[in-house]
Image (cartoon, coloured by chain):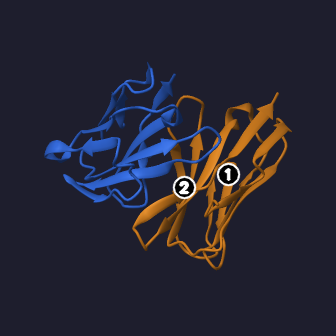
Chain colours: A blue, B orange
Amino acid sequence: EAGVVQSPRYKIIEKKQPVAFWCNPISGHNTLYWYRQNLGQGPELLIRYENEEAVDDSQLPKDRFSAERLKGVDSTLKIQPAELGDSAVYLCASSYVRDEQYFGPGTRLTVT
Amino acid sequence: TQLLEQSPQFLSIQEGENLTVYCNSSSVFSSLQWYRQEPGEGPVLLVTVVTGGEVKKLKRLTFQFGDARKDSSLHITAAQTGDTGLYLCAGFMEYGNKLVFGAGTILRVKS
């Protein structure tokens, strides 16, 4: 069974530029999560989707971050414009059972 | 302030030694997970514990959930170099229906 797929794996951009991350969850997993992991910290939830619906986006900085999950399968997370403090690893996860999440390899974002 | 406190933050031991890492909180969780993360990869789920006092064994790894479901421990017997990685605990909160992670314990096992 294929795991959670994310792309790109690495991205380096200058501040104020836009960036987008893509995630394809495990087949059959209706719940999809985007997390941000700063160096030396655990992942922090940005947004959770149940099918196409964003059911928890309370931690998403909505002035510059946006996400979508069209058709309830893959998802895109966008930052526009990026700031230096956005440098982190962005992880996508999916689940069938709510408390057992399966993570992708992440996208390491560096903003210069 | 982290909702889940993990200790120690960093542990460096020789191959063959035993170790225990801890995950503590003042909050009650309906379940608790342990993940292992290697550099450049996402966390990989090791185990889920649900019942207070529950003990689960996975080869050389023993996981325990506290009676009050506020804390957990991970014990590794006879550590191997392949155990090296970041160990994360995560508690599932019914309120908000979300998983909350600790900051992790970095384990380095030297040969």
Residue corresponding to mark 1: B61
Label 2: chain letter? B
Q: Residue at x 35, y 41 (%)?
A: A64
B12 left or right of A23 in image: right
A74 left or right of B8 in image: left
Q: Amino acid at mark 2?
A: Val
- In terms of secondary structure, where does tag 2 sit? strand
Q: Between residues B20 and B61, which one lies in front from this camera angle? A: B20
Which label number is shown at residue A93?
none
Q: Which part of the image, by quadrant, shows the N terminus of chain B?
A: bottom right
- Quadrant of residue A10 within the rendered picture: top left
A54 left or right of B104 in image: left
User: Do residues under tags 2 and 1 come within 8 Å of each other at their CB atoms?
Assistant: yes
Q: Is residue A69 visible?
A: yes
Residue corresponding to mark 2: B47
Q: Amino acid at mark 1?
A: Leu
Q: Between residues A39 and A26, which one lies in front from this camera angle? A: A39
Q: Is residue B51 above or below residue A82?
A: below
Q: Residue at x 65, y 78 (%)?
A: B67
